[in-house]
Image (cartoon, rainbow, N blue to C red):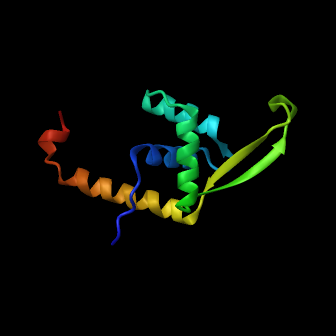
Amino acid sequence: MKVTELGALEELVLLTAASIGEKAYAVQIKEEVERQSGQSFNISSIHTTLFRLEEKKFLRSEMGGATAERGGRRKRYFSLTAEGIAALAQVRELRNRLWNLIPDTLTKQ
């Protein structure tokens, strides 16, 4: 079985987009990744990661309508594809297998 390769930030962004669901957008994803990880990220690194995940076919995007609150600019909304869901499942399975190999004495500390 070929292992899906996701970088650490790719995994965080993909998981966060999945947790938000349809209509996830970059600023919202950035804020949630920061809240959950306790780390600060530059919005450009989030954008780069989102577009890389889209190139890998793990995400798809669509443009929303223009709004007055954004000065007439439109938001790009991201959602997971079937491939993205499968990639997360594969990463989860791998991590669980590895965690299960660790002796209980180490994980109970």
Identified at 71% across, 46% down, the residue is 76
Count of marks overlaid on the render: 0
Q: Quadrant of residue 96?
A: bottom left
Most extreme residue toward the bottom is: 1
Q: Which of 11 and 99 is in front in this view?
A: 11
Q: Position of residue 99 (x, y in %)?
A: 24, 50
Q: Give left or right: position of 99 versus 44.
A: left
For the C terminus, the quadrant is top left
Identified at 12% across, 41% down, the residue is 105
Q: Give left or right: position of 105 versus 73.
A: left
Q: Where is residue 94 in the image (x, y as percent from the top left)?
A: 31, 58
Identified at 56% across, 65% down, the residue is 82
55 up-or-down from 19: above or below = below
Q: Which of 91 and 64 is in front in this view?
A: 64
Q: Give left or right: position of 33 versus 4.
A: right
Question: Can residue 58 be seen?
Answer: no
Q: Nearer the viewer, residue 93 or 2?
A: 2
Q: Position of residue 17 (x, y in %)?
A: 57, 47
For the N terminus, the quadrant is bottom left
Q: Which of 103 and 27 is in front in this view?
A: 27
Identified at 35% across, 64% down, the residue is 3
Question: Can residue 60 be seen?
Answer: yes
